[in-house]
Image: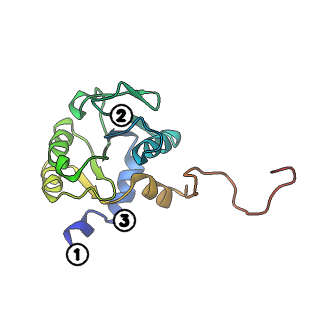
Amino acid sequence: MTALERHQAPAAIQRVLHTASTIAIVGLSSNELRASHFVGYYLKRHGYRVIPVNPRETEIIGERCHPSLRDVPVPVDIVNVFRAPDAVPEIARDAVAIGAGALWCQFGVINEEGARIAEDGGVTVIMDRCLKVEHARYMGRMHWLGFNTQRITSVRRAGLE
């Protein structure tokens, strides 16, 4: 098993998803076209408490922004990272400091030093995986729009255009 595969174990992903209720998204953007915005919106819509962490914003998706993880006033289950890989070690230190349950790095956000810091501090690490995609995969919410449409057929109902 490679170092990266170790941070992509299906059992760990499922455990993190099933036990989390509060997710701090580091690098959440107010731009609706950015992946971080869509992921935050999706997670909020699916019942998670989403806490934006972005020093350049005051509010995103209707939630107050915090300049850093250490400024978040409530316990955090998952720290979801939408930042460059070289920012991960400092984010990992902050995740350990606030007692986060997991450090989740999105696609392409790979930093072994950050993973080591988090793991040494008792924080589960998921790396190079999308939180929204994994939630949809394991929680039965897969749909091209990102939302459960409650429809399992391709047959149109009368009156639907």
Secondary structure category for the residue under label 3: helix
In the rendered image, is residue 122 in sight? no
- Label 2 sits on what residue type? Pro
Figure coloring: rainbow
- Label 3 sits on what residue type? Pro
Does residue 72 sit above or below 95 in this rendering? Answer: above
Q: Position of residue 141 (x, y in %)?
A: 55, 55
Label 1 or label 2, whichever comes before in sequence order: 1
Spatial separation of the CA atoms under disc 1 and disc 2 = 34 Å
- At 19% from the left edge and 46% from the top edge, which residue is drawn? 87
Q: Position of residue 99 (x, y in %)?
A: 21, 39
Spatial separation of the CA atoms under disc 3 and disc 2 = 26 Å
Q: Position of residue 123 (x, y in %)?
A: 21, 49
- At 23% from the left edge and 32% from the top edge, which residue is drawn? 68
- Label 1 sits on what residue type? Met
Secondary structure category for the residue under label 1: loop
Secondary structure category for the residue under label 2: strand
Label 3 or label 2, whichever comes before in sequence order: 3
- Crowding around mark 2 (Cα neighbors within 10 Å: few <14, some 14 to 19, many 20+) is many
- Left or right of 105? Residue 97 is left
- Crowding around mark 1 (Cα neighbors within 10 Å: few <14, some 14 to 19, many 20+) is few
Spatial separation of the CA atoms under disc 1 and disc 3 = 13 Å
In the rendered image, is residue 42 in sight? yes
Q: Which residue is mark 2?
A: 52
Q: Determine the image quadrant of residue 53.
A: top left
Q: Which residue is mark 3?
A: 10
Q: Which residue is mark 1?
A: 1
Label 1 or label 3, whichever comes before in sequence order: 1
Residue in the foreground of this view, choosing between 55 and 62: 55
Q: Quadrant of the N terminus?
A: bottom left
- Crowding around mark 3 (Cα neighbors within 10 Å: few <14, some 14 to 19, many 20+) is some
